[in-house]
Image (spheres, rainbow, N blue to C red):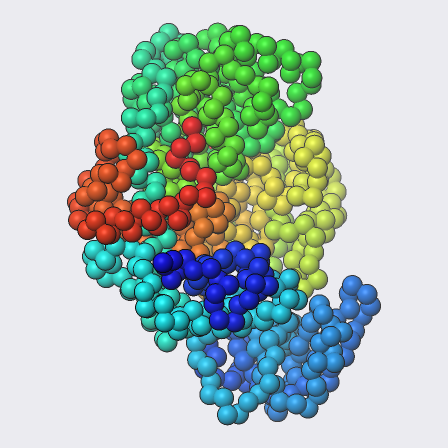
Amino acid sequence: MIPFEDTDIVYLKGVGPARAKLLSDEFGIKTFRDLLYTFPFRYVDKSRFYRIREFSGEMPHVQVCGQFVQIGLEGEGARQRLRGIFSDGERLMECVWFSRVRALKDFYKIGRPYVIFGKPSEYRGVWSISHPEVSDYDSTKPPTGFCGVYNMTETARKKGLTAKSLGTLARTALSHPGFARLRETLPPEVCSHYHLMPLSETLRQLHFPTSAEQLRKARERMKFEELFYLQLNILRFSRERGRRIAGIPFSKIGPKFNDYYGRCIPFELTGAQKRVLHEIRDDMRNGRQMNRLLQGDVGSGKTMVAFMTMLMAVDNGCQGALMAPTEILATQHYETLRGWGEQVGVRVELLTGSTRAKARRELHAALESGEIDILVGTHALLEEKVKFHRLGVAVIDEQHRFGVAQRARMWSKGTTAPHVLVMTATPIPRTLAMTLYGDLDVSVIDELPPGRKPIDTRLRYEDNRMEVYRLVSNELKAGRQVYVVYPLVKENEKLDLKSVEEGRERLIGLFPEWKVGMVHGKMSPEAKDREMGRFVRNETQILVATTVIEVGVNVPNASVMLIENAERFGLSQLHQLRGRVGRGADHSYCVLMTRYNIGGDTRKRLNVMVETTDGFVVSEADMKMRGPGDMEGTQQSGEAFDLRVANLATDGQILNIAREAADKVLNGRPELVTAPGNDKSLQSGVIEISDASADTLTRELRYRFQRQFDWSQIS
Ligand code: ADP
Ligand code: MG
């Protein structure tokens, strides 16, 4: 007999073949389980009706009852919209629709009692809701209380599903007699150990919460479930990995490394750099593939660590590759490394998208014959034609710009998997790193080279603008350069943001004696590179930019980073941007410009920047305070892992617990590890589970990961 949860959705009351196809096509719902695991993306409190006069800035979705006093079409063609004036008997507000306007125009009647529902926003003193949900007011119907909102697609709507359909179907499934037979997805031993809500109750609460507290518990259980299986899957492969994936053993520290270190190195390494080099060396020596994440704040000296790591490869008859996310950055790395390499007879070359065909052919040949020791480049390094003689170590700078799939391609370039060192200036907690990158080991440079002057960071408002420009002017006169960064390219009518173009015009007007360049996301990569190049060469002194200004780009002469509408940026982003200055000048400034009336949370966030220049402190604060946004990179990964409730950026605590739980379970069930070897247990103790529970784990792992790219097995 087919288990209840695996039953084809077509057998659910209210679903026929046509609807089953629609559910499958639009929402990936094929079985009862798929339906029950399609959760509302938001919950709203429909326990009462709001008055328009109660509306305020931070309103969630609310319901209002009243009637339309006027409704009509405005504008022409694609711009056409439907505007309704809605009265709650006391005040007026607007309802606006931008699509299906003709149909809706005749649908809603003036003077009839309706309940409208949506998120109010204010513009010039008028409250409005766009695309409100409208239903007939029924005085006999009690308020519904908590209510989930499901995702809907345009196609599904056209084919007859309404916003409520998924909820109705979920209710049908929850009250199906078979629901009593629903199988637990977590071992009962784990549920009781961590005091988790049982699955059936969890699903009920997630679809139809009875209270905020029950909903919270249900979400917690579901987050745990998602993260537990994610960790279990990673751990069962990673424990084995140490044995399975051979790496090139770099047994000797040879002449190049010693020569460079003894004779040429331009500065004393920091203690942290030395420690990290030891960790890397130990890791590459033992015949297993290194997979290491190197975290180090902006300016902590990761490039030297990368270079010396590649020297170890060269000393052992291998080559090194360094991949950077942009052409500018690759070129800068190349210039640095070529200078260092020259001193010890190490040949460094550059390969990017704009390398000419002839030079490219020569590079390819020299690379394959092993004449090139270190190749620096962009993702052009990953092209099929690029063949290394013997790639020993691949270093990837600023990893978050590269997909993991690209990383995998790079790995397969050697016959034996090369060692991999991924460098990032956006530190993330260890468990998260291991989750995002499989079984990555983590090294941390937690010390800056001596003599760094902290960047003077200031929060400034519109009132202070002239003072800020005076600072800019003084720095320009002292021969320095200035970045001015804006959050958006094209001014959005509603958001009163100064666009890059406008900003540029203004700066040209204010500083006629200086040249102003501009880079933004809508420019071609070549045009961007050209503009960046001009700034690097000091042909322009002010660079107006969106955040496209390249991560890691080095213009030591720049001393001011002026960030407009700073409240629109994430903390990590602000820290990255700030890292563009303070690279040469005696005194550098980062000015965060905002409107005067920013909210308390925003002010708190920006003050973190003012109070610390330590990237680790910034990123920790970022994780803690993050609202609806996501850490860079984690959102996509969340999708790749099919996380529906858990959020990798903000659920760090549950992630840690889930990892510990997975480890404890595996300790008691070594046969679940793909090949028992078990040299990497976290040794956190054991949770003994029954055979039936072990079957549950196997079943769930198969269900969750069979269709998926297996991250740990790439190489
Ligand atoms: P990041 O970690 O941001 O990539 P870089 O590798 O670009 O930092 O280093 C920043 C600057 O610090 C470079 O100019 C580099 O030469 C210099 N540097 C690196 N290590 C040291 C050190 N131990 N002592 C002094 N300067 C150093
Ligand atoms: Mg760098």
Please state if 258 lies on the left or on the right of 387 as rendered: left
Q: Position of residue 24 (x, y in %)?
A: 54, 57
Circle count: 0
User: Which residue corresponds to the image point at 49% horizontal and 88% vertical from the top-left?
Assistant: 141
Please state, as top left, top right, bottom left or bottom right, where the C terminus lies in the image: top left
Q: In which quarter of the image is residue 549?
A: top right
Vertical placement of residue 656 versus 37, above or below: above
Q: In which quarter of the image is residue 194?
A: bottom left
Q: Which of 208 and 540 is in front in this view?
A: 208
Q: Work out whether residue 120 can be spotted.
A: no
On the rendered structure, is 572 left or right of 194? right
Where is residue 657 drawn, in percent x and y? Answer: 28, 51
Q: Residue at x 60, y 35 (%)?
A: 480
Q: Quadrant of the N terminus?
A: bottom left
Q: Report the residue at 23% width, 46% height from top.
A: 665
Would residue 78 be found to the left or right of residue 265 on screen? right
Residue at the outermost right position: 76
Name the residue nearer the viewer: 462 or 224: 224
In the picture as drawn, the residue positioned furthest to the front comes out as: 1
Residue 578 in picture, x, y percent from top left: 51, 42
Q: Which residue is drawn at 41% across and 19% down?
A: 416
Question: In front: 364, or 170?
Answer: 170
Can see residue 181? yes
Q: Picture coordinates of residue 679 (x, y %)?
A: 23, 31
> Which of 189/412 is in front?
189
Q: In this view, does 682 lie above or below 635?
A: above
Q: Is residue 20 left or right of residue 127?
A: left
